[in-house]
Image (tube, rainbow, N blue to C red):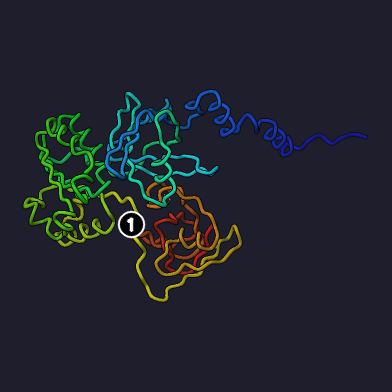
Amino acid sequence: MTTAPPSAFSARKLLREAVRPVADRQAWNRLLQGMHPLWTLGQVRARIVKRVEESDDTFSLWLRVNRHWNGHWPGQHVALGVEIDGVQRQRVFSLSLADDAKRILRVTIRRQPGEGVTDWLHRHARAGQTVDLSQAGGQFLLPAPVPDRLLMIAGGSGITPIMAMLHDLAERGHGGDIILLQLCRSASQRLFADELTALQARLPGLKTVAHASAVSGRLAATSLPEQVRDLARRHTVLCGPAAFMADVEAVWADLGQSDRLQREHFSAPRPPTVPGLARRVVAVDSEQVFTQKNNLTLLEAAEGAGLAPKFGCRAGLCRTCLCKKHSGSVRNLLTGLVSTRPDEWVQLCVSVAETDLELSL
Ligand code: FES
């Protein structure tokens, strides 16, 4: 009996099977990490070199990254990954300082009780441990050339990307006029107070104004034009709590200054309340149907139905939750854009259904 020679197709399949163990990058990464925790095939990993408590609920991790780090632009963020109870979890944090030449980064983290990654890091992160990192990403970057007059508004941990920008401006000898308005609950909650004082010695045009809500009450965004008289001539960067940011955006829109306002959201805006809203969502891959109700994002609705879509930041930054939409319309809460065409990618964590949908879930 003779055996038929393998077809080109089955020969390719056989070859694929034969080289699979060699081509499995994750297996190689696990093997390399067994030899040295920072050795990988192209994946960024970092060792925690120092932990610094910045306030009672906020701390900084100083990280030394491996040679796969591609560098950053001040204002960008990274996704930091850790294994929690056997599950790989990640969350996005802005860099508050980075020296690419020395491969040293700093992320500043506010603990959010009940939120897996920040809570875990608060309890467990120590010098000597290693973590996964993404490359730096994000578009929260100062324009080039840097405007002569800047207004920087930072609420709480929203100061972190702004610190990276200020350090960079100091490094470059920026001589422009900068007003930093820093919102915090109390003086003890004000982050980087000493570091900002030191930066003022290097940035003679930097004026810092701290507003502690426990002393002075909540700052009304509508008071800002009164406080910053030359606001119309300033480029503004803004990062802070979502509600305050929405108020500032509304004021800047009223002044016709929206195009001079740059912002970074740490959390997704909440979906609007529409009484009685219920959209039918077909999860094609898992053959499930669920309803997106009022006040839920698509990610929350899918999780509520027992599905487990991938996610990272839950704020529209990392794109981990990207999902293909086969039909229907979806609104992105961050950009306001509506995806109506079939087979477009949507970010589940910042999107709501405008019509019934079919998703690749
Ligand atoms: S989870 Fe990061 S963009 Fe949606």
Which residue, as the protein is rendered here, is positioned at the far right? 1
In the image, 247 versus 146, the foreground residue is: 247
**Quadrant into which the N terminus falls:** top right
Specify whether 73 is left or right of 357.
Answer: left
In the image, 186 versus 60, the foreground residue is: 186
In the image, 170 versus 107, the foreground residue is: 107
- Residue type (three-letter) at the residue carrying disc 1: Thr
The answer to which image quadrant residue 102 occupies is top left
**Image point 60% across, 33% down: which residue?**
24
Number of labels in the image equals 1
**Image point 43% across, 54% down: which residue?**
347
Q: Position of residue 2 (x, y in %)?
A: 90, 34
Q: Position of residue 30 (x, y in %)?
A: 56, 31
Tell me if residue 235 can be seen.
no
In the image, 204 versus 108, the foreground residue is: 108
Determine which residue is flagged by label 1.
335
Q: Position of residue 52 (x, y in %)?
A: 31, 34
**Quadrant into which the C terminus falls:** bottom right
**Image point 15% across, 54% down: which residue?**
215
Q: Circle 1: is it few (<14), some (14-19), or many (20+) Cα within 10 Å?
A: few
Which residue, as the protein is rendered here, is positioned at the far bottom? 276
Above or below: residue 167 compared with residue 58: above
**Image point 18% across, 35% down: which residue?**
194
Q: Position of residue 37 (x, y in %)?
A: 49, 27
Above or below: residue 242 compared with residue 110: below
Specify whether 321 is left or right of 140.
Answer: right
Disc 1 secondary structure class = loop
